[in-house]
Amino acid sequence: MSRNTPEVRVPRLVGLMGVDAREAARSRGLSLNAPDRPDPGGVVVDYVVRQYPQPGAEVPRDSMVYVWFDFGPGEGGGGVHEPRVPPPPRGGLQRELDEPGDPFAVLSPR
């Protein structure tokens, strides 16, 4: 879209780091606001987890896009699940399953 168009499409910002989200919005003529951060300009390496308006929405140039860097209460954000305690057993499938025999072996009569 050219700079002269009155409306622009909102880019997908979820999953981007703060600095990249700001640049993606600025390249479309949009501004960012982060209601969950007092200083959104200081957010650099945190990742966007939610945005409004949704990606692909057409909005007037110079509009504000709201982004959140933290999940709200009850919205998920389970965090890092590693390392698991207790760790999984060693040996994988070899430990859990018996080795199969030769499926084409002929049993000799006794």
Image (tube, helix red, strand yellow):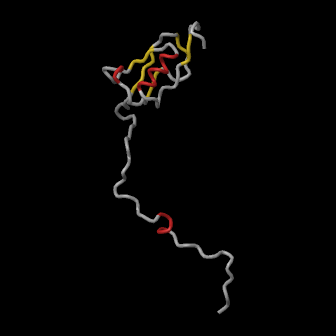
Image quarter for residue 39?
A: top left
Q: Residue furthest left?
A: 38
Displayed quadrant of residue 77: top left
User: Residue visible at 40% across and 59% down?
Assistant: 88
Percent across and percent down for residue 16 are 46, 29
Q: Residue furthest bottom?
A: 110
The reply, left or right, for residue 101 in relation to residue 96 is right
Q: Quadrant of the N terminus?
A: top right
Q: Is residue 57 left or right of residue 67?
A: right
Q: Where in the figure is residue 37, as x and y percent of width and height? A: 33, 23
Q: Which residue is found at the position 41% from the left and 31% from the top? A: 47
Q: Position of residue 68 (x, y in %)?
A: 39, 26
The vertical placement of 64 against 44, above or below, is above
The image shows residue 73 at horizontal and vertical percentages of 34, 33
From what the image shows, is residue 65 above or below residue 90? above
Q: Residue at x 55, y 73 (%)?
A: 99
The answer to whether residue 110 is left or right of residue 62 is right
Residue at 42% across, 64% down: 90
User: Residue 73 vs residue 26: left or right?
Assistant: left
Quarter of the C terminus within the rendering: bottom right
Number of numbered markers: 0
